[in-house]
Amino acid sequence: MSYEIALKCRECGRKFELLAIYSCEFCFGPLEVDYDYDQIKAKISKESIANGPSSLWRYEDLLPCDTSFKVDIGAGFTPLIKSQSLAKHLGLKNLWIKNDTVNPTWSFKDRVVSIAIARARQFGYQDLACASTGNLANSVSAHAAKAGMRALVFMPDDLESGKVIGSLVYNPILTMVDGNYDDVNRLCTELAASNNWAFVNINMRPYYAEGSRTLAFEVAEQLGWRAPDHCVVPMASGSLFTKIWKGFKELQHIGLINNLDTRMSGAQATGCSPISKAFQEGTKNFVPQKPNTIARSLAIGNPADGYYALKVMEETDGSAEMASDAEIVQGIKLLAETEGIFAETAGGVSVACLKKLVESGVISTDEETVLFITGAGLKTVEAVVDNMKPAIMISPKTEEFMDQFNKLK
Ligand SMILES: *Cc1c(COP(=O)(O)O)cnc(C)c1O
Ligand SMILES: [Zn+2]
C-alpha cells in the first residue's frame, strides 16, 4: 500500500505517471512525488507511528513505495541527542544533534537507498546503480547485497579508503572514474539512458530523494511532535536540505504538527560551496565550481537541487555558511571531544558552519537548533590522522608508563 499518486514537475506542475523518469518532458524541470494527503491524514496517527518498527518504515504511509518490496537493513530512527557541552561551547541554550552516523552503512544515505531499492524492485529492476561521492556507493552496495541484486557503483577515483572498502566489502561492481563527481554523474546519466538499471539518484531520483524526509519526521516525533526553530544541514546536491523542509511542511499539512516556523540553514565546504556562495551573494543562480575540499561526500560542484535549496533559505528566513578544510577538522574534533560523536568530514562542515552562524548572530542563543550529523568518522580518518594528540608508546613496564604519564601534567 502506498499513497503516491503521480510525479509532478517542480517547475510547471504538470503531472506524470509513476514511472522510472526524473525530468519533465515539457520544461525539463525535476519531478517530485505527489501524494494523496487526504487519505494519508485519514489513515495515519501519532499512535500508529509509535506502534511501528524502530526504523524509517514506521513512516511507511508517507513513503513512495509498496512496502512489500522493502529491503530492511535497519535504516533510520537514529538518536536525537540533547547537547550539553557543545551547546555551552557555542553559546546555545537549546541544541540537539541528529546522529545519523549510526545507520547501517554509517551515513544518512541508507534512508534514500531504502526507498530507492524498494521502488526499483517494485518496477522489476534486477540491477541497482548509482553515481556516488562515497557514502551512496556504500549504501547501494549493502542494500543490493541484502536483496540479492547486482550493484553497479561509480565514484571518483580520489575517495578515502574507508569509502572504497566500505563498498567493496559487499562485492559490487565498483568503477572508479578519473574525474570529479560531476564527471561521474554525467557518465552515469548516459549509462542510465542505454541500460536497464535502476540508478538510485538518476532514474529513481524522485523516489530516492523522498527518503530524506524521514529525517524531518523523526526529529518532529522525537521532539514530541513539533518542529525546531532552526535546522543546520550539510549540502551536496542540496536534496537532503530541501527534503527535510518538505517533510516538516507535510507533517503540518496532515496535522501531525501545529506550528511550523523553522529556519533552514545550509552548510558547505569552502572548497565546494556553490550554494552557500550564491546565498551570500544574494542570488539564486549559483555558479558551478571545481571541488577542492577534504569534505569529499559534499563535493558536488554543480548541485542538482541548488536552486531549490536557495529558495528554501529564502522561504524560511534561513542562511548558508561555508567552512575551510582546517575548520572542518576542528569541527570534527570539537564534536568528538564535546559529545562523543565521531563524524566524517561532512559532520565537521556542519559543526563549523553552526559555529559561524552563532558567532555572526544568525542563530540566536535561545533558538532551539537541530544539527544534522550525516556520516561517520571512521570513513574519513585521513582527514584527521595528522591532527591527533599522539599515543603514549611504551614497553609493558609501570615505570615507563608513569614516567610518560607524569610528563603530560
Ligand atoms: C550525500 C551526503 C550529504 C548531502 O547530500 P545531498 O546531495 O545534498 O542530498 C550530506 N552528508 C553526507 C555525509 C552525505 O554523504
Ligand atoms: Zn515541467
Image (cartoon, grey):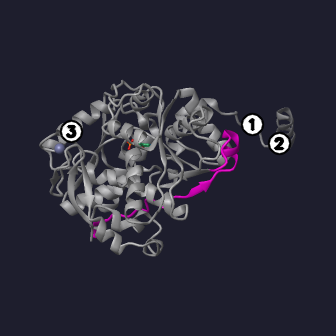
Residue placed most toward the observer, 81 or 229: 229
Q: Is residue 82 magenta?
A: yes
Identify the disc placed on residue 397. Answer: 2
Q: In this picture, which residue range is highlighted in magenta?
A: 68-94
> Is residue 167 inside the magenta stretch?
no
> Which sits in the foreground, 242 or 136?
242
Element class at badge 3: helix
351 versus 278 height, above or below = below
Between discs 3 and 1, the one toward the N terminus = 3
Q: Residue at x 58, y 33 (%)?
A: 356
Say which quadrant the N terminus sits in.
Answer: bottom left
Q: Position of residue 326 (x, y in %)?
A: 57, 27
Amino acid on which the number 1 mark rests in the picture? Ile
> Disc 2 marks which amino acid?
Lys
Quarter of the rendering containing residue 395: top right
Q: Is residue 271 above or below residue 28?
A: above
Q: Which mark identifies residue 11?
A: none
Q: For the point 36% across and 24% down, which residue is it?
A: 290
Q: Is residue 309 visible?
A: yes
The label nearer to you, 1 versus 2, is 1
Mark 2 vs mark 3, foreground winner is 3
Dot 2 alpha-carbon crowd within 10 angstroms: few under 14, some 14 to 19, many 20 or more: few
Q: Circles 2 and 3: CB distance less than 8 Å?
A: no
Q: Which mark is residue 392?
A: 1
In the image, what residue type sits under mark 3? Thr
Between the C-alphas of marks 3 and 1, the distance is 51 Å
Q: Which residue is mark 3?
A: 189
**Nearer mark to the viewer, of 3 and 1:** 3
Label whose residue precedes the other's in the sequence (2 or 3)? 3
